Image: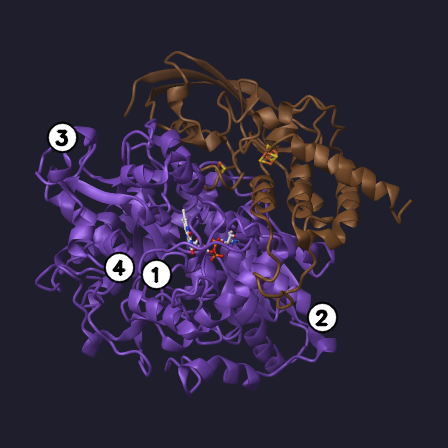
Amino acid sequence: MSGNMNLTLKVWRQKDEKSKGKIVDYQVKGISPDMSFLEMFDVLNEDIIKKGETPIAFDHDCREGICGSCSMHINGRPHGPKSGITTCQLHMRSFKDGDTIVVEPWRAAAFPVLKDLVVDRSAFDRIIQSGGFISVNTGEAPDANAIPIPKKYADEAFDAATCIGCGACVAACKNSSAMLFVSAKISQLALLPQGEAEAKQRVESMIDQMNEEGFGACSNTGACTAECPKEISQVNIARLNREYISAKLTSDNV
Amino acid sequence: MILDSKIPAGPVAEKWGKHKFGLKLVNPANKRKYEIIVVGTGLAGASAAASLAELGYKVKAFCFQDSPRRAHSIAAQGGINAAKNYKNDGDSVYRLFYDTIKGGDYRAREGNVYRLADVSRNIIDQCVAQGVPFAREYGGYLDNRSFGGSQVSRTFYARGQTGQQLLLGAYSALSRQIAEGNVTMYARTEMLDLVMVDGVAQGIVTRDLVTGEIKSHAAHAVLLCTGGYGNVFYLSTNAQGSNVTAAWRAHKRGAYFANPCFTQIHPTCIPVSGDHQSKLTLMSESLRNDGRVWVPKAPGDKRPADQIPEAERDYFLERKYPSFGNLVPRDVASRNAKEQCDAGKGVGGSGLAVYLDFSDSVKRNGAAWVKEKYGNLFDMYAQITGEDPYKSPMRIYPAVHYTMGGLWVDYNLMTTVKGLYALGECNFSDHGANRLGASALMQGLADGYFVIPYTVGDYLATIGPKPIDATHPAFKEAENSAKDYVKKLLAINGTKTVTEYHRELGHIMWDYCGMSRSEEGLKKAKAMIQELKADFWRNVKVAGEGEELNQSLEKAGRVADFIELGELMVDDALARNESCGGHFRVEYQTADGEAQRDDENYAYVAAWEFKGEGQPEQVHKEALVYETVKLTQRSYV
Ligand SMILES: Cc1cc2nc3c(=O)[nH]c(=O)nc-3n(C[C@H](O)[C@H](O)[C@H](O)COP(=O)(O)OP(=O)(O)OC[C@H]3O[C@@H](n4cnc5c(N)ncnc54)[C@H](O)[C@@H]3O)c2cc1C
Ligand code: SF4
Ligand code: FES
């Protein structure tokens, strides 16, 4: 083994969506501080498999903080104790030998648990499908430099566009609100001239879909931004609210 | 079977235009009678699915992640090439074409590459229109940077997250088509087999990764957009789930696999820190624009970087390749780093690393400038290594990154199986023996947005809109064979885990079929892989059951396919008695250690045909014809 940290893990185990789950304790030994949190789980799972038991299911893919798959609620915080990173970017040097670590899935009515630490986040996809796009068919585009976009707006749009759709904002919010996620997409497209034509309709449909999926209301506690691995700003929620109010004021769907 | 690449005759610049005009069109009213399956929703798959749905076809799209937005394309950092020549620095479609052919060490098709360079310009337009927030200059116009293997600035980028922004653009177009009911999306669903009826692809078999249900889907055409197979090396920069299963199972059903040994080792990755490591992290090659690569001049010099005086450093790329310097192509940069480390000049604890130093750039441009350009990459480095790259130089080492090989396709992107297409990294088409940086994103989107919408129509118009008969026994047969396969894996119940086999395979591949290859080593590797395969099927332990979410089972199927692919890669590397691009055979090098091509005997694509379990595969050769570019020894001096 490559390290010398010994830890106690308390992990949520749940067979499938319908079964009831519970916390199960595991001891892991010989953990290196250079391991990522998920590599520590790999070590644990290899152990579990060797014992003939069922390994712990968890979502992951890129393991570099960009795909948004990983989603562990660690010691009460989405993506763990450090700010601005995802679970897969968390390293064991952030823990101490002898620590007890509690790991649970995202908790939200709109994100049902499928197994162990795996949740269903397809509600996010449906929100994007309801309007998180610019309606341009392949082949219709004018030259890319036809519309200059001031760097300031391009940069702000980019900041909003860095959302990885992980759902930590929802998991962090006591109301399970998806406002930060929705506002990031709304802001990105509202800041760009290409997004203007559909702006009104976009914000209305996305908010409607968000409500329909069972996400809660936003009470501006800011817990979402604090836990967001991409540090998506609250300014986006304010922009979303402005867009929504102005859309409603002039809406055709009253 | 004679391989017909279907490259149109005529001058290279006119081939695609003429070919497009010759393709049959589908009557718009008939389009919705055709069903198309798109497996994979990375850049290639999402762009294809969206574009085909916009045209009116009925599309079914599949991915194994929980959402199409998470495909491996999301991780691409550095940028995407396009011959826009916005910088007025001498770029053109012809130059991008030429750079790509040369960068690929003259093992790619002229016709395909020219088309790629040509449509590259439309890609940028399309992405900007979708709201992709590319980097801009203060005047509001698009910014560019340069990448390895080129002397012009043609790479468009979105900070260090270009792949993410391009994929989210394609995902948004796909989402719109899902909402309109033109695409049915199956996430958390894995393709296990191809359904063939009378030698024609007519559907696929899938496993629902949540319930374990195995079933089949019928369609008039099947598009594989399932990415590359770098994970055959266990450690690579690819996402954990990236795999060869879809392509491999199609290969076993008759699709030839081309140039499997052409793999790319990327020079700028974070070095391995221990045997727990599950993946390697790439530091975008764009860093080589402003960072300088060096090692100490004296072997065994273990002083910290800041105590090694300037005169005792060797900036080996700048020294050996004065005109390209740190921007030589990837294969050259990687091999040189290995050479320095082999000579005992490697840095860091393991000695398997070289420095990538930004101190000159910080001096020249200021730390803020460096942060603006590379901030997220520096943060990533700090997060992984626990060291501050603003203070001491980064340590980098080559890692497996991309696979130029893949399913053989003709100019229309059709494989050797009628009705089966391959797009993006899954095919072999455009990068020859080495891919230039920022060209994979370009190829994936070219294939999906601007090539397949034309070429698949031609095939569909030919076969006609008659519905596919999903009750044909071939569907049940393929389903049953997939079910038996799953049962077989679960029944072995041995003692070694899937990961242990995967790691072993990775070691064999890296040691003998990695950055340098020899006849002796490859022969040894072949025997080792055969042994590993036999042992796997005797002794693997797969946990859990078939009818549930079972990641151990998913992985087992993928590793089983990697083992078989590994053997074919070794065969391919053994059969290619030359060095070219990423394929470096130690027996074939020039006096100064550069790759020595043999154009007389090896200017061909090696396309391998599966001949049955346990049988040697048969190679078919497609001669590469150069009508426009003159083959020369690649030189970056
Ligand atoms: C870290 C990194 C950085 C990179 N940076 C750059 C860059 O800056 N510029 C550049 O040009 N290129 C870059 N590349 C290369 C580039 O990202 C890839 O080649 C490209 O994104 C591949 O796209 P794709 O659509 O072919 O496949 P992928 O994006 O890999 O998508 C594969 C899809 O297939 C699905 N799939 C796979 N198997 C199955 C199956 N059996 N059943 C169902 N679905 C399946 C997956 O779910 C996924 O949706 C980078 C690569 C890496 C690893
Ligand atoms: S806003 Fe932040 S926390 Fe929420 S989904 Fe996006 S990246 Fe994750
Ligand atoms: S695994 Fe991709 S963000 Fe963590």
Disc with the residue nearer the chain's start (3 vs 2)? 2
* Label 2 vs label 1, nearer the camera: 1
Taking the image as shown, residue B465 lies to the left or right of residue B166, namely right
Residue at coordinates 53% horizontally, 76% vertically from top-left?
B198
Q: CA distance from mark 4 to mark 2?
A: 44 Å
Q: Position of residue B142 (x, y in %)?
A: 52, 55
Give the color of chain A as drawn: brown
Q: CA distance from mark 3 to mark 4?
A: 30 Å
Dot 4: element: loop
Q: Position of residue B306 (x, y in %)?
A: 20, 30
Q: On the image, which quarter does residue A169 sit in?
A: top right
Q: CA distance from mark 1 to mark 4?
A: 9 Å
Q: Can residue B149 be seen?
A: yes
Residue type for callout 1: Arg
> Where is the N terminus of chain B found, in terms of image quarters?
bottom left
Give the color of chain B as drawn: purple
Q: Looking at the rendered structure, which numbered label has been put on residue B582?
A: 4
Ligand 1 within 8 Å, label 3 CB: no
How many residues crowd around disc 3 within 10 Å: few (fewer than 14), some, or many (20 or more)?
Answer: some
Q: Which residue is mark 2?
A: B32
Asked if the residues shown at circle 4 and circle 2 are in contact, with their CB atoms under 8 angstroms apart, the answer is no
Q: Is residue B100 above or below residue B465?
A: above
Mark 3 belongs to chain: B
